[in-house]
Each structure stands twice: as structure tokens, then as C-alpha cells.
Amino acid sequence: KWNQILSKVELPSTRMLLSQQAELANIESNSVLIAIAPNWENMIKSRKLIIENAVQKVFGDQIKIIFTSKKLNSNNSKNKRIERPKQIPDNKIKKPFFPSLNPTTEENLKKPNIDSSNNLAQFFNGEIIEIDE
């Protein structure tokens, strides 16, 4: 039923939010209980009308939605151990290579770098074209 409700949600962003941060907790004769992640409570509640419309498309006009907080399971608890990244000694960090960007003549300043433009165009599966003025 949850997947049916999600399929009726008109906004893709709301559908994605619900699929990741909410779940169908209970269905009663006149209400649907939706458990939502505490961190996303305000965001989901602000979309109540959109969610209610989707629920009504599945269960009928007389049904209302009720939100409740999702209980965090042991996998999501704050007691989870967080590993820190290992420190890399400075002498092991590779420095990026930047070629010299100091043109020596005024002509080099005015001339566009065609090779880098072609490389960029090829990267995006395009090409450089010249427009005759």
C-alpha cells in the first residue's frame, strides 16, 4: 500500500523524500499513520496536503493522515562508532601539477588556447566551430 501511495504523490521530490524518510506504520478505517524520521519532520509535515491527496486517491476521500516520529533502530543510533580518517603524512600527499601560465609575449595573451578548447569540446562530445562575421 505504501508504494501505491508513493506512486500517487504528484511531486517527485516529495515522493523521494517520503520513500527515504517515512514509512506506512498503520492503516485504520478512517486514518493512515505515517512514521517519519525526526530530522525530516518539519519538511514532511509542510507537504501534508500533497501527501493527504495521494492517500485519498488510494483509500478514498474520508481518510485522514496522522504523522508520528519514527523510532531510530540500533543501526541508526547515536551509539554507532564513527571511524576517523587516517592521517596522511605531508610527505606522502601528492601535489597537483600546474603548468606555468605565464605567457611571454603580448601575442600569446591575445591568442586563445585552441588545444584546451578542443579538449573541452571533445569531453562534452562537441566540437569547436568558427563563425564568420
Image (cartoon, helix red, strand yellow):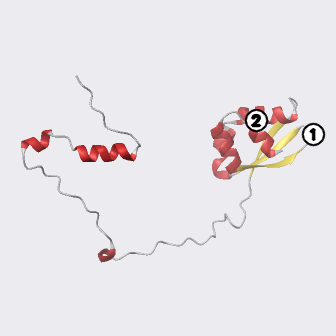
Residue at screen point 72% across, 32% down = 49
Residue 81: image location, x then y, percent: 59, 72
Label 2's element? helix
Residue at screen point 66% across, 45% down = 17
Residue type, mark 1 in image: Ser
Label 1's element? loop
Front-lying residue, 10 or 122: 122
Residue 111: image location, x then y, percent: 15, 40
| Separation of marks 2 and 1 at Cα, in angstroms | 20 Å
Q: Quadrant of the C terminus?
A: top left
Q: For residue 90, which quarter of the picture?
A: bottom left
Question: As drawn, is 39 to the left or to the right of 112?
Answer: right
Residue type, mark 2 in image: Lys
User: In the image as oriented, which residue stretches furthest toward the top?
Assistant: 133
* Residue under numbered circle 2: 8
Residue at screen point 13% across, 52% down = 102
* Residue under numbered circle 1: 29
Residue 55: image location, x then y, percent: 80, 36
Q: Quadrant of the N terminus?
A: top right
User: In the image as oriented, which residue stretches furthest toward the left?
Assistant: 105
Question: As drawn, is 83 to the left or to the right of 98?
Answer: right
Which one is earlier in the sequence, the residue at label 2 or at label 1? 2
Residue 93: image location, x then y, percent: 33, 71
| Mark 1 surroundings within 10 Å by alpha-carbon count, few (fewer than 14), some (14 through 19), many (20 or more) | few
66 to 129, vertically: above or below = below
Q: For residue 114, which quarter of the picture?
A: top left
Front-lying residue, 117 or 49: 117
* Discs 2/1, front: 2
Question: As drawn, is 87 to the left or to the right of 15?
Answer: left
98 to 5, vertically: above or below = below
